[in-house]
Image (spheres, helix red, strand yellow):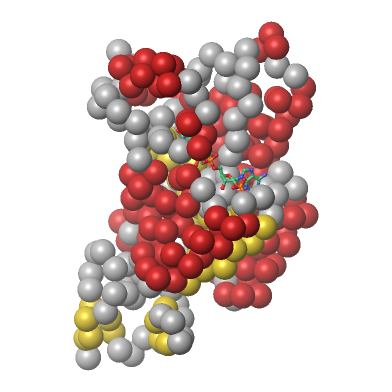
Amino acid sequence: MAIALACTSTTSGFVSSRIGLTFDSTSRFAPSSLNMVADDAKVCVVTGASRGLGRAIALDLGKHGCKVVVNYAASEGPALEVVEEIKKLGGDAIAIKANCADPDSIAEMFNEAMDKYGTVDVLVNNAGITKDTLVARMKRDQWQDVIDINLSGVFYCTQQFFKIASKKRTGRIINISSVVGQIGNPGQANYAAAKGGVLGLTMSNAKEFASRNVKVNVICPGFIASDMTAELPAEYLEKVCETIPLKRLGKPEEVAGMCSFLALDPACEYITGHAFNVDGGIAMGA
Ligand code: NAP
């Protein structure tokens, strides 16, 4: 019997409230006192999900009925708010504090996620920082901190995720890089190196993990309105907007839409090792 519900379990196991609205009543279904989340809903770890792009990505996955691990480094209050919002949207979530630059902390996060949900299906490597300055002035820690969180953090999370996914012979990784990793930016040598590294890591992992049916893709956002871009001077952002073919900053929700597609859509069963730009056209150049 098909019942209309906010949550769909497709034959490939992906859960979507947007793509179809029928629910097969024979699927396992676990009603809770607050909401109804399918037992086989995809479990998604989103790093840096307390704010900005990660928050929008976590909410969008929640809207699709997923169980979301909302990772954060310091912002416990905002992370818990994201958890509550996901539950209201029809998903389930927990917040886990873990430092992406610390492999032990990341291993603990995955253990906690496994204890809570029993598996992990999707990893979104989103956590990132900037410490911008010109190369001539860049201190060693400004270089290293950005590499540690933005690049090594992706590696540590990927290693933990692949332990789980390789046994199941299924899984999807979505890395969040940047147009800066593709075209560079003065004052961001550390960030460009880390984000360029994420592009290479994505392709290597896509090739290495293909035999285990684990897909790895990367999103390259352009300039997106968030706390990160709010740090930039207004005149600089105005000049940047003039160089963007679509003449505006992107919205976190626009990156989130691409991320949910790569994480959940059945079409992505045959897509791996690719970069998808959500950048208003800026990476095309003049
Ligand atoms: P944001 O608003 O500054 O948020 C950063 C997120 O990362 C926060 O949730 C933060 O957690 C988390 N985080 C920072 N250090 C962490 C650590 N060591 N371990 C775990 N989590 C950590 O940044 P955003 O603009 O949303 O950027 C998100 C991602 O998109 C980054 O990888 C960034 O490079 C990339 N990106 C952004 C833009 C843009 O224009 N905004 C463009 C291209 C790419 P706390 O809240 O706990 O600190």
Q: Quadrant of residue 26?
A: bottom left
Frontmost residue, 34 versus 215: 34
Quarter of the image that includes the N terminus: bottom left
Report the side of 17 relative to 36 (left or right).
left
Q: Residue at x 57, y 75 (%)?
A: 117
Residue 194 in the image: state x and y as whole percent.
60, 30
Q: Pick whichever, 181 or 242, lies toward us.
A: 242
Q: Quadrant of residue 153?
A: top right
Q: Is residue 189 above or below residue 8?
A: above
Asked if residue 186 shows in the view, the reply is: yes
| Quadrant of the displayed image that contains ligand 1 | top right
Res 121 seen here: no
Q: Nearer the viewer, residue 80 or 278?
A: 80
* Residue 211 shown left or right of residue 65 in the figure: right
In the picture, measured across the screen, residue 83 lies left or right of residue 139, that is left
Q: Quadrant of the C terminus?
A: top left
For the point 30% across and 17% down, the residue is 242
Residue 197's spot in the image, x, y percent?
Answer: 59, 31
